[in-house]
Image (tube, rainbow, N blue to C red):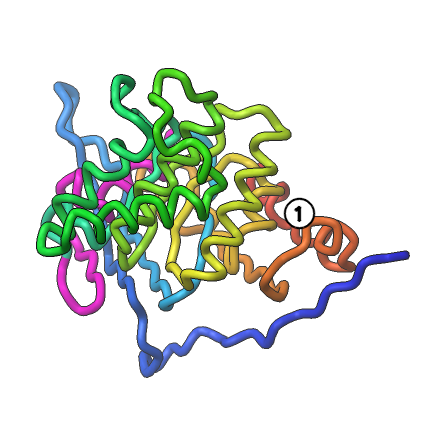
């Protein structure tokens, strides 16, 4: 039996600016000084993200995707322009932005629970110890690790470590989740499993997210919009593709949807030119 999937109603961009956005990137510029002169990585980059929206960013290596994400995270200073999160300009890192890297960088001698608790204890210092522990356990359970609270990070598989990384970021209850190729180091089976985990958690938590990926299929499966960046230097947004599939998403249904291969072809054509 053929699976079916319905399109959601597309909310068009409002050029008049009446729509409320959680994240606004205005005329962003990033320059690195070199002995040969200034190297302009990003220039005149503009992007708006609505609350609850999940977008993916694709582009060739070296186009500035990670640089952009690190600037949103507050880990990389802005040369020009502005990044505004819920009305406040970003000037440095903060718990309102959760980050998931390709490698979760856990402390190997600590348990899964203790690794998640590192951030929770700081952000929710006003809560009781039990309340903080409950937050950690809740999000570890959400990513399928309810039986591994006390396992040392060094004894976890790469996939389990990345689940801890996802739980650690979500446990801080960030306004926006930033993901830098979070599944890039995983085998295809584990990658698919964690994509499903991420989708389930995002659907329940209604978390806003921005993800960098080189995987065209992953970008279509996870995102509401795919942002395509031009090649650097002076990279900016070259195209935006709306992905109008309903949530929660079903992988088989999306693969069989009439527009799936059109979307895929659109992204591949952009990357090849």
Asked if the stretch drawn in magenta spans residue 155, the answer is no
Asked if the stretch drawn in magenta spans residue 69, the answer is yes
- Part of the protein shown in magenta: 62-89
Q: Horizontal placement of 204 versus 180: left or right?
A: right
Q: Is residue 78 visible?
A: no
Q: Percent position (x, y) of residue 164? A: 38, 35
Looking at the image, which residue sits at the far right? 1
Q: Provide the secondary structure element on which disc 1 rests.
A: helix
Disc 1 residue crowd, few under 14, some 14–19, many 20+, Cα 10 Å: some
Which residue: 37% across, 68% down?
50
Q: Is residue 2 visible?
A: yes
Image height of 17 relative to 68, above or below: below
Q: Percent position (x, y) of residue 223? A: 52, 54
Which residue: 47% across, 21% down?
157
Which residue: 41% across, 61% down?
205
Looking at the image, which residue sits at the far front? 130
Residue in front for this viewpoint, 163 or 77: 163
Q: Horizontal placement of 262 versus 219: left or right?
A: right
Q: Quadrant of residue 208?
A: bottom left
Q: Horizontal placement of 236 versus 25: left or right?
A: right
Numbered marks: total: 1
Q: Looking at the rendering, in which quadrant would you find the N terminus?
A: bottom right
Residue in front for this viewpoint, 192 or 238: 192
Q: Percent position (x, y) of residue 271? A: 56, 39
Circle 1 is placed at which residue position? 264
């Amino acid at each position: 039996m053929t699976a079916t999937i319905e399109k959601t109603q597309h909310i068009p961009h409002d050029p008049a600016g009446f729509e409320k956005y959680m994240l606004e990137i205005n005329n962003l510029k990033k320059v690195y000084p070199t002995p040969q002169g200034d190297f302009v990585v990003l220039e005149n980059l503009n992007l708006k993200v609505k609350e609850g929206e999940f977008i993916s960013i694709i582009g060739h290596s070296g186009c500035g995707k990670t640089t952009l994400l690190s600037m949103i995270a507050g880990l990389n200073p802005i040369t020009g322009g502005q990044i505004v999160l819920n009305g406040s300009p970003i000037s440095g890192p903060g718990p309102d932005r959760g980050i998931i890297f390709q490698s979760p960088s856990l402390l190997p001698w600590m348990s899964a629970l203790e690794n998640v608790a590192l951030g929770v204890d700081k952000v929710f210092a006003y809560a009781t110890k039990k309340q903080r522990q409950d937050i950690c356990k809740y999000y570890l359970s959400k990513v399928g690790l309810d039986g591994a609270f006390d396992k040392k990070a060094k004894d976890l598989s790469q996939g389990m470590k990345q689940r801890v990384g996802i739980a650690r970021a979500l446990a801080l209850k960030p306004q926006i989740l930033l993901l830098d190729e979070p599944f890039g180091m995983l085998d295809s089976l584990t990658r698919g499993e964690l994509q499903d985990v991420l989708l389930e958690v995002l659907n329940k938590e209604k978390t806003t997210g921005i993800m960098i990926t080189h995987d065209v299929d992953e970008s279509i499966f996870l995102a509401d919009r795919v942002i395509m960046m031009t090649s650097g230097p002076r990279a900016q947004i070259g195209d935006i593709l709306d992905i109008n599939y309903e949530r929660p998403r079903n992988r088989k249904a999306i693969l069989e949807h009439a527009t799936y291969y059109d979307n895929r072809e659109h992204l591949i054509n952009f990357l090849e030119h």
